[in-house]
Amino acid sequence: MDGYRGQQTSCNSPRLRYPLQKTHPSARRDIVMDSILYSTPDNPVPENRIEGFFESFDGRRLRYAVFRSEQTVAKGTVVLLHGRNEFIEKYFETIRDLTAKGLWVATFDLRGQGESERLLKDRRRGHIRHFSDYERDLTAFLDKIVLPDTRLPFFLLAHSTGALIALSAAPRLASRIERMVLLAPFVGLTGQSASASMVRTLSSVVSAIGLGGMQFSKKNREWAFADNPLTGDEPRYRRNVALATAYPQLVLGPPTARWLREAFGAIGRVITPEHLFSITIPTILIAPTRDGIVPYADQERLARYFRAAQLIPIHGSKHEILQERDIYRNAALAAINAFIPGSDAEANAQALEVES
């Protein structure tokens, strides 16, 4: 077991049973925290959880949490992968939805974001050295946390950049993951001041001359709610803004040139027919038709060669489907609930109950 599992703490209420020393780089060393998860009045931390840090393949400390269902026999575990500049707290509502269905949820902050270890001295630079590092982090999470501490079978639910990670790693996950749900997978880019091809070329050139840590802009673009490309639901939008305002240490700035180069490289690889043919995990691809970040056409094109996947358009939804208005969010949840854990879940749960 890795050296940081000793910080794991079991929680049956919003407060931890035992104080946990906060050790992330932005924390004062003399402050003892009662949780490594954060809450706001309209976004409380779900109960019945385990939280801590695990050590990845290269020694990076990544923050994780496992949320358990109150149901006696779990129907399985959903491994939840976030998008870029997201963090565990943003998914509390969805975590409650999933655990209410009898599923456990295991999730972690991607390297370089949230409360996971950052890669550059400037914490706000969204950086990655190699896209494959994300995949190796996922493998470490499955090995160190999911396999020993959660319940079979395992499912993968991934949004945007998380879905790109899932797509890239999927050919090697067939023996571990039963089913995948990909939400607005990051397989294209729109809504930027420069075209996707220009961003790809510039990031490649800048990285090649040794300036991969450079950002093309210093500050995230700020949208009024009416103009934002993420969600049409104002209360959820305000909730996420309040989280970022209350806990700015969770938030990233724009990506570096190296991050962009690595992401575009991964996109170019996963959209090839050869790669898509190699994925055998049954998958649903939930695509918002009004996505202002990833063009719907690119998501639709992905599905054409993805033999194991079924495309489910959410007409009218923007990019962040699980942060959207109920009419769109509920449609996505209905598709997820119908697909995960699958029609044989009840029979499997009954068999486990008899064995126990």
Image (cartoon, rainbow, N blue to C red):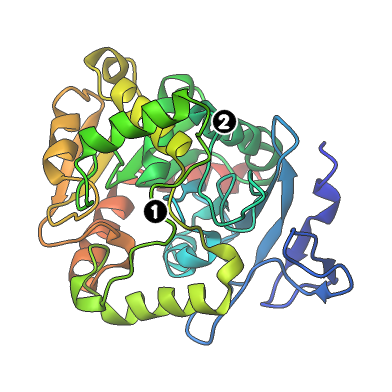
Residue 285 occupies quadrant: top left
In the image, what residue occupies the spot 39% across and 43% down? 161
316 on left or right of 136? left
Say if 336 sits above or below 172 in the image: below
Horizontal and vertical percent for residue 177? 47, 32
Badge nearest the viewer, 1 or 2:
1
Q: Which residue is mark 1?
A: 217
Q: Secondary structure at mark 2?
A: helix
Horizontal and vertical percent for residue 273? 22, 16
350 on left or right of 35? left
136 on left or right of 339? right
In the image, what residue occupies the spot 47% across and 66% down? 90
Say if 246 sits above or below 26 in the image: below
State the residue in front, 66 or 301. Answer: 301
Does residue 112 show up? yes
In the image, what residue occupies the spot 52% across and 59% down? 87
Q: Residues within 10 Å of mark 1 (few under 14, many from 20)?
A: few
Q: Secondary structure at mark 1?
A: loop
Q: Which residue is mark 2?
A: 133
> Residue lying furthest right in this view?
30
Give yes or no for contact between labels 1 and 2 (Cβ–Cβ under 8 Å).
no
